[in-house]
Amino acid sequence: MSTAASLRGIGHQLDDPASLGQALDELLAAHTEPPTLLALGEPTHGIEAFPLLRNEILTHLVERGYRSIVLETDFFAASVVDDYVDGSTAEIDEVLATGFSHGFGAVPGNRELVEWLRTHNAGRTPSDRVRFYGFEAPVEYAGAPGPRHALSSVNDYLPAALRPESARDLDTLFGQDTDWSNPAAMFDPAVSIGNSDRARALRIIADDLASALRRAAPDLHAADPTGYASAVAHARTAQGLLRYHAAMASPVPDRIALLLSVRAEMMAENLLAIVAQEQQRGPSLVFAHNAHLQRAHDEGEVSWGSAGALVRLTLGERYAFLATDANPDSAPGTLQGMLAEATTRRALFPTPALRAALPPSIGTGKPIVPGHIPLNPAELGGADAVIFIADTDGKRYQYW
């Protein structure tokens, strides 16, 4: 039997909502524990087919008890979207502009998602509404903000008697916000403030504030669960930002990888916080780049873990990952070419069967746009299944 025939035999063609739902149900049922977090990746941002697939999957999962969706967008900014889908009177264009980081409000499929969530939630009880979250760290491509807002939020939340002595000099240590957000620091460690005396002092204060929150948790949480959760999120963010700035100041050879690893840690911490918050309501669907969600690398040198790999250490089988890919001009002899040959429109391939059917000599296709990371056959073990989309032109919509 040819490889193409074998792949057609194991692929679940996703031609309509019914076949999509059946394939998802079978995949999730194969887990020894029902996933608490189902991760759906995309190989790049801005290609319409992937967010639209996400929207279809969410519609099905909501019928199966999923009660939240989590996107690769700023953790705090996402509250603007969550308020809107919960019924706020804001204008949707403003929500898309301010509730998404990285310009992702303009990505095709996100307006449709927000509108669907608002319509779905209307008239439902809070326990039955689908919430919107972001799990991204508050960083952008050209830099990161300072810790002023996050640390001040924690310090102001704590009763005066519980504020650590170290925090008395906060305002002096912050300095100018532009000292922290200087874009040149992303590329030149000598420009970064992250290893300065005041940055190191702020890391001690951040630790002291986080500790104070934990030690006072029983009373603070009982009095104001929402306020306490927000303070904890700000404390977590302040610590992560200060680690990120310290990494920017580091002259190590693979400095960008170090920065990405700190970002991944922050993303993982946010995901686990969301899982904890949603545990009484239902599972969550998370959508981001494949690179953020893969469970682990197959083999090779020790490397920094992705957010998905870090989360899986805690959730185990309760974390499931579906990778996606596409290539309108798939080359023969590549993973993408073979999947395209076995796909009428789009299809889901369970990873164990897929890996067993592929020849050892299989290669990897070329990127279709900058930022597209084609699935590598050697990394398929990091996913439960692969969804390949054949009916896309691969066009990226400019969203920034």
Image: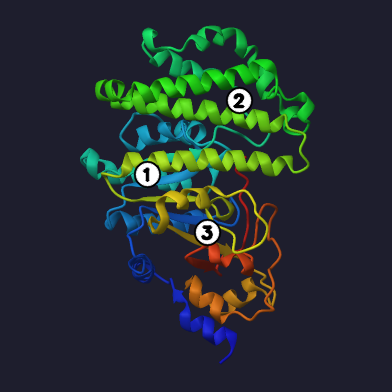
Name the residue: 66% across, 37% down: 141
Q: Where is residue 331 in the image (x, y as percent from the top left)?
A: 70, 74
Give how far apart the Cα atoms at labels 1 and 3 are: 27 Å
Name the amino acid type tagged 3.
Ala
Task: Return the disc, 1 or 3, that comes first in the chain's sequence.
Answer: 3
**Color style of the picture:** rainbow
Query: Mark 1: few, some, or many residues within 10 Å (few <14, many ≥20)?
Result: some
Name the residue: 50% across, 66% down: 387
Name the amino acid type tagged 2.
Pro
Q: Position of residue 80 (x, y in %)?
A: 42, 31
**Screen quadrant of the C terminus:** top right
- Circle 2 — which element? loop
Residue 157 location, quadrant: top left
Residue receiving disc 3 = 49
Viewer-proximal residue among 371 and 328: 371
* Extreme-bottom residue of the structure: 1
Residue 381, relative to residue 42: is it above or below? below
Residue 34 location, quadrant: bottom left
- Is disc 2 in contact with disc 3, using a CB cutoff of under 8 Å? no
**Residue 327 appears in the picture as rendered:** no
- Is disc 2 in contact with disc 1, using a CB cutoff of under 8 Å? no
- Circle 1 — which element? helix
Give how far apart the Cα atoms at labels 2 and 3 are: 33 Å
Q: How many labels does the image show?
A: 3
Residue 233, relative to residue 108: is it above or below? above
Residue receiving disc 2 = 145
